[in-house]
Image (cartoon, helix red, strand yellow):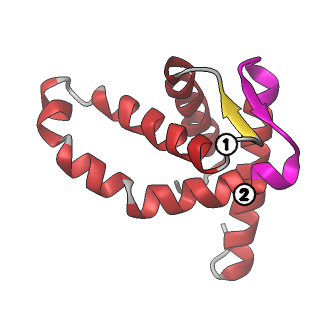
Amino acid sequence: MKKGISGFVLQLILGAGVIMLTSYLFEGVYVKDFSVAFLVAIVLTLLNKFIKPILNLLALPLTFMTFGLFGLVINGLILYMATVVLAPDFQIAGFGLCIVTSIIVSILYSILGLNK
């Protein structure tokens, strides 16, 4: 992936495509249009950069006791926070679907080589 601002914008566009794809895969995931998906990609980038490290640190004992599986819950919580920020245009039906959607988004990000 290219470095610099153009690489970052390309990552956001591909991330928006992943968000749109998950909205087509799951009936409970609603994204109004591609511009909202682009905003979701920006919000997820910011949440993953600033909030997720704090949550990982606070949940470290629980993550250790569950052999890392609590990390899936943290990813689902980050995605839920994105739905709260962009509430009317981006919705996910329930927290369980947030966790499943975050797993699919993580897999697709890995396949595309995007850094979360």
Picture disc at residue 39: 2
Read off the residue under disc 1. 87
Q: Residue at x 61, y 41 (%)?
A: 83
> Does residue 103 appear left or right of residue 12 in this picture?
left
Q: Residue at x 19, y 23 (%)?
A: 66
Residue 7: name its quadrant. Answer: bottom right
Q: Which residues are magenta?
A: 23-37
User: As shown in the figure, which amino acid type bears the numbered disc 2?
Assistant: Leu
- Crowdedness near tag 2: few (<14), some (14–19) or many (≥20) residues, C-alpha within 10 Å: some
Q: CA distance from mark 2 to mark 1?
A: 12 Å
Residue 79 on image: x %, y %: 53, 40
Q: Residue at x 55, y 59 (%)?
A: 45
Note whether 19 is above or below 69 in the view shown.
Answer: below
Q: Are dots 2 and 1 in contact, CB under 8 Å?
A: no
Nearest the eye: 91 or 44 = 91
Quarter of the image containing the N terminus?
bottom right
* Nearer the camera: disc 2 or disc 1: 1
* The furthest residue to the right: 33
Picture disc at residue 109: none
